[in-house]
Image (tube, grey):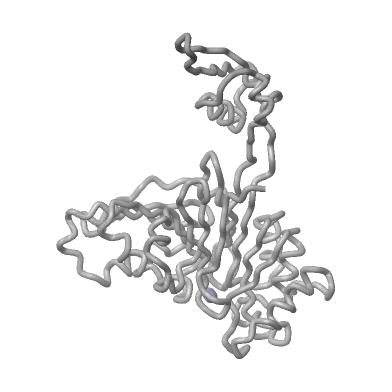
Amino acid sequence: MAVAFAPRLLNPPFGDPGLYVALRHQGRAMLFDLGRIDRQPAASLLKIGHVFVSHTHMDHFIGFDHLLRIFLARELHLDVFGPPGIIANVRGKLAGYTWNLIESYPFTLTVYEVGLERIEAVHLPARTAFAPEPLPSRPFDGVLVDTPQLTVTTAHLDHRIPCLGFALAEKTRLNVRPERLAALGVPPGRWLNQLKDGVREGRPDDTPIDAEWRSADGPQTRRFTLAELREELLVTTRGQKIAYVVDTLFSRGNLERISVLANGADVFFCESLFLDADRDQASKRYHLTARQAGTLARAAGVARLETFHFSSRYDRNPLPLRAEAQAVFRGESPVDEPS
Ligand SMILES: [Zn+2]
Ligand SMILES: [Zn+2]
């Protein structure tokens, strides 16, 4: 299957969290968490259009300044999504610098604060020294981004503060069967995109689709219905899905929310700060153990589990943390039970 999303953690598992996801077809990228990013090439950071911040503990948010500095003088826009308090957190960061001499900078930033009931938003343009322009709020329904290609959904998890977990899912993929298209005797063109958009949007079966092309005799048109082309030409395939969960308590509520959020993911990136031997530390600090990460991955029925965000107490050896999580995930050792 061709890959739409190419995810990679920006730091080693003992470093700050940050998952960079290249969106292959668009040449753009998304970033989940904003820990230390100053060793990344600017060219790859500049592809980022969306940043999703789980929570603003320092190890998840210290990279904001670096990202801002790279974007500042460019004609670019960033959408930043975060938990309750994120607007004040971003404005607090911006208030830490002096912003004269940037009136000509075209950079703009929009911050979305994802509350339990509503999403508040504020627009912050560089040219006005980031004077906030409030945008209309909207009810929270779990969906942060919804484009014809993909969705990003979220859930509020409990880290003694709200912490957002995320899932990035490609919409059902529609591919054209080349041999059927050839048999139809009509060349490919923009009309194929009209067909795919119509199918994705669930338009009625009798919606007309006009195939238009140029031949030696001049412009040609042939009219089809959406239904006949859908049956004849298209193959649908399930899209790719990536889930990202950090800094969360192993509770029944979190287990249920994560099972839904990460359900069926191709890759599940999950923190596991501690080993099962230190489970008391984990619950005191509202974090997961490797065994608990394995339990969550099983409950969500994911294809692959990748654990990270390991505590420095384990002497820089990631192997026991990985082995514990994978053994539970594969069913070779028992799952944990939330208290
Ligand atoms: Zn953390
Ligand atoms: Zn934290």
Q: 198 or 4, which lies in front?
A: 4
Q: Residue at x 60, y 56 (%)?
A: 167
Residue 226, relative to residue 75: is it above or below?
above
Residue 255, relative to residue 126: is it above or below?
below
Q: Quadrant of residue 229?
A: top right
Give the tally of numbered discs: 0
Q: Quadrant of residue 258?
A: bottom right
Q: Where's residue 26, x and y in %?
A: 48, 46
For this orientation, the residue located farthest to the top is 217
Q: 288 or 203, which lies in front?
A: 203
Q: Is residue 152 left or right of residue 283?
A: left
For this orientation, the residue located farthest to the front is 216
Q: Residue at x 47, y 76 (%)?
A: 59
Q: Where's residue 287, x and y in %?
A: 62, 76
Q: Where's residue 36, x and y in %?
A: 44, 74
Q: 49 or 234, which lies in front?
A: 234
Q: Residue at x 79, y 74 (%)?
A: 327
Q: Is residue 197 left or right of residue 65?
A: right
Residue 192, relative to residue 154: is it above or below?
above
Which quadrant is the C terminus positioned in? bottom right
Q: Where's residue 316, x and y in %?
A: 59, 87
Q: Residue at x 32, y 69 (%)?
A: 93
